[in-house]
Image (cartoon, grey):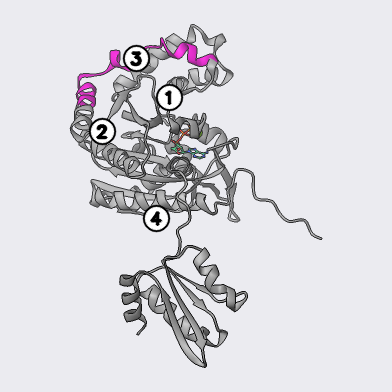
Amino acid sequence: MPKTPQAIRGTQDIFGPDAEAFAFVVDTFERVRKLYRFRRVEMPVFEKTEVFARSIGETTDIVSKEMYSFDDRGGESLTLRPEFTAGIARAYLSNGWQQHAPLKVATHGPLFRYERPQKGRYRQFHQIDAEIIGAAEPQADVELLAMADQLLKELGIEGVTLHLNTLGDGDSREAWRAALVEHFRAVKDELSEDSQERLEKNPLRILDSKDRRDQRFVADAPKIDQFLSDDARAFFDAVTSGLDAAGVKWTRAESLVRGLDYYRHTAFEFIPDEGSEAAGRLGSQSTILGGGRYDGLMESLGGAPTPAVGWAAGIERLAMLVGDKGEPLADVIVVVENDELIDRAIAAIGKIRAAGHSAELMASGSPRKRFDKAVKAGAEKIVAFAIRDGAEHVRIKADEHATGSLEKLLD
Ligand code: ATP
Ligand code: MG
């Protein structure tokens, strides 16, 4: 016997209650993004490698270690998208979407990163994503965060808090960066190997390190607040007062940076509260939604300076938090107790589904047991076709009201 091929490490075959939870996340996102008037976009799964290399930044983990890149048959280097933002920014520039600015877009789908697979971390995973492009005002950040907050509430996810920071504008960020380099250089030998490397290339990312050797020195590292320009401070104040007005709870997280080079001003993550049920379910893979303002991105792709803000959330991690949605029962089961009546039943189930009721046909196995099987399956409404004393007989098992409307429908 030939050997059955195995799935690729880090991919998932999602089925049953997990697939229902996944769909619930996507459906809820679709509903909420419409409430906030985000327009739907569908993006390519692959792009030229330079789209990600230039916009995400060569020094990031994503570009330096996690991308699935390959040469296509024409010899061009392509990459399976590791995130949405870079591709959306490329599309914004190459399609002239500037004419729609400020443009609010939302999408979801698979992403690919070569990471060590573990609970809540996969090589093909899925995100929902929302972006506001061409909006410089702090109100855009507020609206985007209010949408994230409402989404989590509508998913029924509790015990998750918005952790918020500012990276300041370009100048603030540079001054902070210099101070961080000085701080960490003094303890360089005690940092993790990764952070020793980051020290020269991308020191902000040391703050993001999950390595305990680094975390000791992160606590007393210089804070951005000392370096904020008046404009950057005013921007952050407008974001926080907007969030308060919108009723979005947040907490200041002074060490929070986003790993990607193009972020400015607002940076944020929604993280389960310590000791909460959500934290218990997610284990160490704790961030469920993250994003920020990326005013510097478009220029790295050769576009005009374009302010923008966005977030992405892992669908798998959200699905782990929404819990078991079960698999819904059929509204109606149509039972064929005599096989001669199969076409009658097919016609009937067509009408039932066209009227918007989910329906399952029960027409296999021993004819005499089918009705009992339908009862056992838990359907509240059963329509059974049988022949009794040579005549066709339709039996409806439902409450009085439903019986009436089914009779009318099948008439
Ligand atoms: P992490 O710190 O967990 O690696 P990240 O900073 O790489 O996250 P982002 O690039 O901001 O994550 O992606 C946003 C969200 O996408 C994360 O908060 C998480 O929910 C999800 N995510 C990221 N990478 C993975 C993965 N490999 N598998 C599953 N979900 C992921
Ligand atoms: Mg990561």
Q: Position of residue 142 (x, y in %)?
A: 24, 35
* Mark identifier at residue 223: 3
* Mark identifier at residue 213: none
Q: Is residue 186 above or below residue 381?
A: above
Mark 3 and mark 4: Cα distance apart in space: 39 Å
Q: Is residue 265 above or below residue 320?
A: above
Q: Is 236 contained in the magenta span? A: yes
What residue would you read off at disc 2?
A: 248
SS at circle 3 = loop
Callouts 1 and 3 close, C-beta under 8 Å: no
Q: Total marks drawn?
A: 4
Q: Nearer the viewer, residue 339 or 127?
A: 339
The answer to which of marks 3 and 2 sits earlier in the sequence is 3
The answer to whether any part of residue 37 appears in the image is no
Bin the neighbour count of mark 4 within 10 Å (Cα to Cα): few under 14, some 14-19, many 20 and up. few
Mark 2 and mark 4: Cα distance apart in space: 29 Å
The answer to which of marks 2 and 4 sits earlier in the sequence is 4
The answer to which of marks 3 and 4 sits earlier in the sequence is 4
Q: Nearer the viewer, residue 188 or 207?
A: 207
Could you tell me which residue is drawn at 51 percent across and 87 percent down? Answer: 387
What residue would you read off at disc 1?
A: 274
Mark 4 and mark 1: Cα distance apart in space: 36 Å
SS at circle 2 = loop
The answer to which of marks 4 and 1 sits earlier in the sequence is 4
Q: Nearer the viewer, mark 1 or mark 2?
A: 1
User: The residue under label 3 is which amino acid type?
Assistant: Lys
Could you tell me which residue is drawn at 58 percent across and 73 percent down? Answer: 369
Mark 3 and mark 2: Cα distance apart in space: 24 Å
SS at circle 4 = loop
Bin the neighbour count of mark 3 within 10 Å (Cα to Cα): few under 14, some 14-19, many 20 and up. some
Q: Which residues are magenta?
A: 213-237
Q: Nearer the viewer, mark 1 or mark 3?
A: 1
